[in-house]
Image (tube, helix red, strand yellow):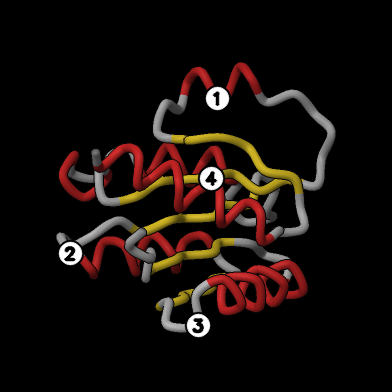
Amino acid sequence: MEQLYHYLVVDDDKTSNLICDFTIQRFNSGAQRNLFTRPEEALEYILGKGLRAGITVLFLDVNMPTMSGFEFLGEFEKLPREVQEQYKIYMLTSSIEDFSSQAEKFTCVQRFLSKPMKLSYLQEIALEIELIKL
């Protein structure tokens, strides 16, 4: 199975980012990892990258102070379709709240994951993306 080599983590919680970074590195030591504590900076990064080869897995926190994960998705959906298609978005949350209504609105979200990041999430995602490619 081909490894995924690019991950973006957008979470205002530095501890959560460190856990994500460590877990991704443990899963795939050669992966490119970009971590952002400000969602606005992540959007700028995505805009600056433009089209690139391969899929980027984006882990996005639901609750952030300057821009919520859902506000981020609203801005993300304004990007050109070909840029959006390069990203597989997984929402991270420590909340027990039901986000099913938001999930219906933002079809770009693959699914919601409970914090903290787990190795099993990365294994499942890699398998899902491989199956999509077939």
Q: Quick one: SS at disc 3?
A: loop
Residue carrying label 1: 103
Residue 122, position as x, y percentages in the image: 56, 57
For image coordinates 44% across by 66% down, the residue present is 7
Q: Nearer the viewer, mark 3 or mark 4?
A: 3
Kindly identify the amino acid type of the residue bearing the numbered disc 4.
Tyr
Q: Looking at the rendering, which quadrant does residue 5 occupy?
A: bottom left
Residue carrying label 3: 29
Left or right of 62, for residue 36:
left
Determine the CA span between mark 2 and mark 3. 21 Å
Mark 3 / mark 4, whichever is N-terminal: 3
Mark 4 / mark 1, whichever is N-terminal: 4
Q: Nearer the viewer, residue 102 or 19?
A: 19
Residue 72 image label: none
Mark 2 / mark 3, whichever is N-terminal: 3
Tell me: residue 27, above or below residue 60.
below
Residue 90 image label: 4
